[in-house]
Image (tube, helix red, strand yellow):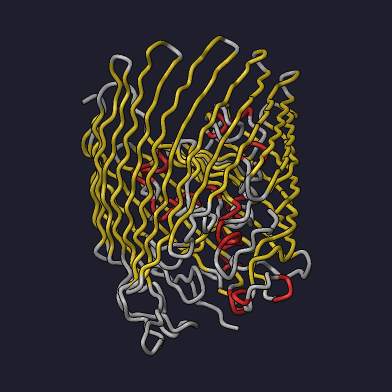
Amino acid sequence: MSKSRTGLPAPKAAHCLFTFALLPFAALAQTQFDLVAVVGTREPQALGRTVADVVVIDSSTIRNAAADSVEDLIRKFSGMQVTRNGGPGQSGGYFIRGASASGTLVLIDGVRVGSASLGQAEFEALSLAQIDHIEVLRGPASSLYGADTVGGVVHIFTRRGEGGPRVTGSAAIGGYRSYQGEIGVSGSQGGFDYAVTVGRESSDGVSALRPNDQFGNFNPDKDGYSRNHGNLRLGYTPAPGHRIGVNLLETKLNAQYDASEFNPPDFIQDPSPDFRNHLKTRLGSIDYRGVITSLWTTTLQASNSVDDLKSGGIAISRFKTERTQATWQNALQLTADQRVILAYEHLREQVEGDVFADKPSRNNNAFVVGYSGRFIDALIAEASFRYDHNSVYGSNKTGNIGLSYELIPGLKVRALAGRTFRAPTFNDLFYPGFGVATIEPERGRSFEFGVAWQSGATSASATVYRNNVRNLIGYQPDRTFCPADPAYDFGCAGNVSNARLQGATLTGAQQWGGLTVRATVDFLDATDSDTGVRLIRRAAHQETLAADYDFGAWTLGASLLSIGSRPDNGGVVLGGYGVVDVRANWRFMPQWRVEAKVLNVLDHRVEPVRDYRGLGRQAWIGIRFDGKGV
């Protein structure tokens, strides 16, 4: 058994962080309860009236965070665990409450994105510069969003124009020959609103793999990346309460990685080619939202999204997903405190590529009914039901019910229970020599209980949860459970086991004048309930501690991320590690500021996945312009 020497010893880091976290437990800051989020009920609602466990990462937090990527940002502020095959720009996975990446739904402005063949979104395709804010729902939500929300939902929102013309821009350079730059224009005038952002990022990086990896794929070249991105959001308000919007987004990622090919004529392993992932993500949508009467608000959206990956060295493989989606949602405000939501969704998914010669597709039609209401001021109830019918794997019914009660001013308890399901991916269903068309969706039953407290500049929350999932989809090595075709002699996809996902999340924040301290502690027990074996790549605990000090023109910040040991492939256990990041901003003019940050200050060795390595110490220096009202 090998153990990586990565940063702080996990138990010591966890103990220190837990000691700090015991001060007060809370969400990102004392203002979280006052924010409005969509993800918890599908309609805008104050977090203080949402029963679900929702975190909002606002635009100011995104701009000020010392994060190297979208997935790193979400990890630091919502407790999501991340596995990545190297540094920024590399592919990887993520877990919310222990559920796999294919059990977490990712939306951009209401549109489902990601690869339907792999069953997950590629966060590496996105730039932080494209994002206005992020809402993370921690916990199952199949009754609202359908398949693939076993762990939760990540809803990413791009910028929308408002107010007078505004020009923003930033440029920065960093270690490993890294640079990034972006410029944006936004505003509104005469019923029209607009926001456009374009940018580019690049880094030489390091070799993604360490020498002597288990499969012999190491190549000493540097595995860097470049990413071009742009998005455009337009809107027109012909009358108060009615808006028509258009949204366009595109990113192009070119990322190097290490692998091997076995090409003719000798078919000898060759790790020397320049392996690259060329990933294009494109999204387009048109929507209408109108307040028909004081009791009825309707929303219509039609969208198309494409995830197009070309991957390889000498031999190139292609995997393309195209989704067409239509949604009609109606919010009926029965009284000031009682609301019903009725929605219909149609989703068509199609994949194509070298291994999918016949371009398989599937259609899903869904009906959603949701309710939220408040009684006697202190009691809030939420319930939802969803019926999905899929052309490939049949029908699914899911429901959810939740209650919260304010025991005393500022102290609230809540409980939720529901059912979930995860759809098999196109690889699970159709990949030659592996996919099985009769495979069943994963299904789960979940329960969670939470308590939240807020008093002035202090706020606190704690949540415990349990999710029992059956029919886990994975590799079935027993030939007798696979189709008779000889292509399946080495196994196939199958419903192979059951899982128990349980744990607790403790979060806390306190503000003293210009100083804000935040802490999060996540405990996770993710095991195969048939054997009691821990699921791979899930850490038993993960902690974050952050402190920010604002004294006028200067702001200073520091954060610590600590991750416990994780089992990985081949029976290897990777040791825990800790990473310290620091940042400083100086606003030398009202619209200009200098930004500096150092990631992994202590230059600790990071092994996010077996045999892979993250970056060492990396310093950044840059400048940002925010021309409000230009």
Instruction: Give the image location of residue 260, x and y in percent.
Output: 40, 79
Quarter where residue 318 is shown: bottom left
Location of residue 306 with respect to 243 vertically, above or below: below
Of the pair 200 and 454, the residue shown nearer to us? 200
Q: Is residue 553 visible?
A: yes
* Residue at 53 percent of width and 50 percent of height: 361
Of the pair 105 and 309, the residue shown nearer to us? 309
Instruction: Give the image location of residue 466, x and y in percent.
Output: 74, 51
Instruction: Give the image location of residue 49, x and y in percent.
Output: 63, 27
Instruction: Give the image location of residue 527, x and y in percent.
Output: 71, 64
The quadrant the C terminus occupies is top left
The quadrant the N terminus occupies is bottom right
* Residue at 65 percent of width and 41 percent of height: 141
- In the picture as drawn, the residue positioned furthest to the right comes out as 530
**In this rendering, position of residue 54 left or right of residue 63:** right
Location of residue 223 with respect to 325 vertically, above or below: below
**In this rendering, position of residue 113 left or right of residue 101:** left
* Residue at 60 percent of width and 61 percent of height: 428
Of the pair 28 and 558, the residue shown nearer to us? 28
Q: Is residue 511 visible?
A: no
Location of residue 593 with respect to 329 vertically, above or below: below
Of the pair 397 and 541, the residue shown nearer to us? 397
Q: How many marks?
A: 0
